[in-house]
Image (cartoon, rainbow, N blue to C red):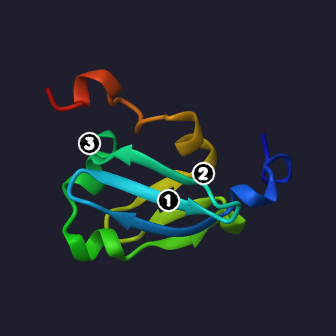
Amino acid sequence: MNIYDVPAGERIKDVHFTEDTLSVDLWDGRTITAPIVWYPRLLHATPQQRENWQIAGAGFGIHWPDVDEDLSAEGLLRGAPAPGVDALAAMPK
């Protein structure tokens, strides 16, 4: 899939965190929320490092330069954790 196959509304508008979650607002009005434990680099980042994000990939991705993390809207919409993370095992008991 290339960026021309992704609907324009799936572009990223904003990113925010709670203690346990990452939320990404899309231009079409949807918000994707995922557990932060799915993304170990973000889990172990400081609040300042988490807030230092940039829109990437023509608006379809997010880059955190301080922790070298990249996520895509498509991956977030699929509910895909970071490679090597067992989504169920990573969830708090």
Tell me where residue 79 appears, x and y as whole percent: 50, 35
Question: Residue 13: x percent and y percent?
Answer: 59, 70
- On screen, 72 above or below 81? below
The disc, 3 or 1, on the residue closer to the chain's N-terminal end is 1
Q: CA distance from mark 3 to mark 2?
A: 18 Å
Which residue is tagged 2?
73
Pinpoint residue 85: horizontal percent, then vertical percent.
33, 30
- Measuring 40% from the left and 70% from the top, which residue is drawn there? 65
Asked whether the beta carbons under mark 3 and mark 2 sit within 8 Å of each other, the answer is: no
Residue at numbered disc 1: 24
Residue placed under numbered mark 3 in the picture: 37
**Residue 38 marker:** none
In terms of sequence position, does the residue under pointer 3 or pointer 2 come before the other?
3
Mark 3 residue type: Val
Query: Foreground: 52 or 92?
Result: 92
The tag earlier along the polypeptide, 1 or 2, is 1
Tell me the residue at 49%/34% (across/down): 80
Which amino acid is tagged 1? Val
What kind of residue is marked 2? Ala
Residue furthest out toward the front: 29
